Image (spheres, rainbow, N blue to C red):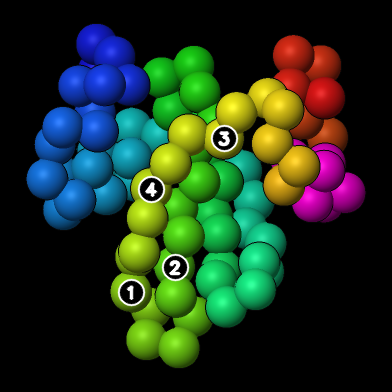
Amino acid sequence: MKSWQAFTQLPMESRIQTLYERGEFIVSIRYYQFKVNLFEFDGSLVEVFVYHKDSTICKISRLEEDNKRLSFYCDQIQLPNIYA
């Protein structure tokens, strides 16, 4: 994928397929009513928000370095120093 912007322009089904085929799953966490799967994709950390009651993917977003949710992931695994 050439850029994050190009990725976000894809239909949701294509984004999901691309991410699951070409991304690298890292870990999942529980966050309020969601299960959030964290992937490394095309040089970025990407979150997939899954509504746990019916397994619907609600949102796919890039996790920015200053996001407070990053600490939840760091508690679970050792991320590369560029993210910690």
**Main structural element of the magenta stretch: helix, strand or loop?**
helix
Earlier sequence position, callout 2 versus callout 4: 2
Residue 83 visible in rendering? yes
- Which residue is labeled 1 in the image? 56
- Which residue is labeled 4 in the image? 60
Q: Disc 4 versus disc 1: distance between alpha carbons?
A: 12 Å
Amino acid beneath label 3: Leu
- Residue drawn at point x = 49 percent, y = 80 percent: 52
In which quadrant of the rendered view does residue 5 lie?
Answer: top left
Answer whether labels 1 and 2 touch (C-beta < 8 Å): yes
Amino acid beneath label 1: Thr
Q: Which mark is residue 50?
A: 2
Amino acid beneath label 2: Val
Residue sitting nearer the eye, 13 or 59: 59
In the rendered image, residue 13, in percent from the top left (x then y), is placed at 16, 53
Q: Based on the picture, tell me whether residue 44 belongs to the magenta stretch.
A: no
Identify the element where label 1 is drawn.
strand
Amino acid beneath label 4: Ile
- Residue drawn at point x = 24 percent, y = 28 percent: 7
Q: Disc 3 versus disc 2: distance between alpha carbons?
A: 15 Å
- Which residue is labeled 3 in the image? 63
Q: Quadrant of the N terminus?
A: top left
Q: Residue furthest right?
A: 75
Answer whether labels 1 and 3 touch (C-beta < 8 Å): no
Identify the element where label 4 is drawn.
strand
Q: Is residue 81 above or below residue 22?
A: above
- Residue drawn at point x = 38 percent, y = 48 percent: 60
Q: Which residues are magenta?
A: 70-77
Q: Is residue 28 above or below residue 46?
A: below
Earlier sequence position, callout 1 versus callout 2: 2
Q: Disc 1 versus disc 3: distance between alpha carbons?
A: 20 Å
